[in-house]
Image: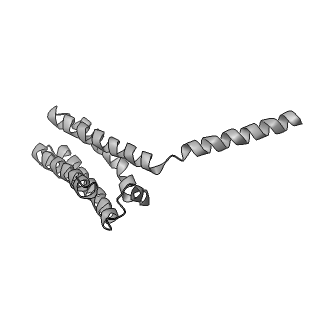
Amino acid sequence: MKKALASLALGVLLAGSLNAAEKQDPRLELMKDMRTMMDAMEQIQRGGLYSSTEEMKSGVKKLQGTLKSLEGEEVKVILPKDQVYAYKFAQKSAHMLRLYSDDLVTSVDAGRMDDALEDYTLMLKQCMSCHIRIRNW
């Protein structure tokens, strides 16, 4: 009976520690998403330079997978508290990134690489605009 109780207590303790490990600091998760966004932009650019439409599409998919972190409430933990517009600006940036990246895929599928390059440029401008305004560069 004592062994069973001890095993049960150990199991509860381990389960609790695993649950705590899953709930990471939201700042770390957001910063991880930001790095993934940068990697995705590099992948899209690399695909364009090497005429690899599949790599470009894969980069778009990777980028769009991270946009939920900018669209949700969690983004508020990394935004400056003294800038009232920061949250709305981050949401708008995420919306525009989704719009431009969808258009990039449409352009690639239609073989319009000039339009895809323009979409990539607009996406990069969205990234830089957010970093300049919110991060005070």
Taking the view exactly as shown, the residue that stands out farthest to the right is: 1
Residue 123 in picture, x, y percent from top left:
21, 51
Q: Residue furthest top?
A: 50
Q: Is residue 122 above or below residue 52?
A: below
Q: Left of 12 or right of it: where is 123? A: left
Q: Residue furthest bottom?
A: 84
* 29 relative to 56 in the view: left or right: right
Residue with the most extreme left position: 114
Q: Residue at x 43, y 57 (%)?
A: 74
55 and 10: which is toward the camera: 10
Which of the image's four quarters has the N terminus? top right
The colour scheme used to paint the residues is one colour
Q: Residue at x 70, y 41 (%)?
A: 13
Q: Is residue 103 in view?
A: no
Q: Nearer the viewer, residue 99 or 87?
A: 87
For residue 5, what is the image quadrant?
top right
State the image coordinates of residue 86 (x, y, percent, origin top left): 31, 63
Residue 71 higher or lower than 33, as above or below: below
Instruction: Give the residue drawn at x 31%, y 46%.
Output: 63
Q: Is residue 46 left or right of residue 80?
A: left
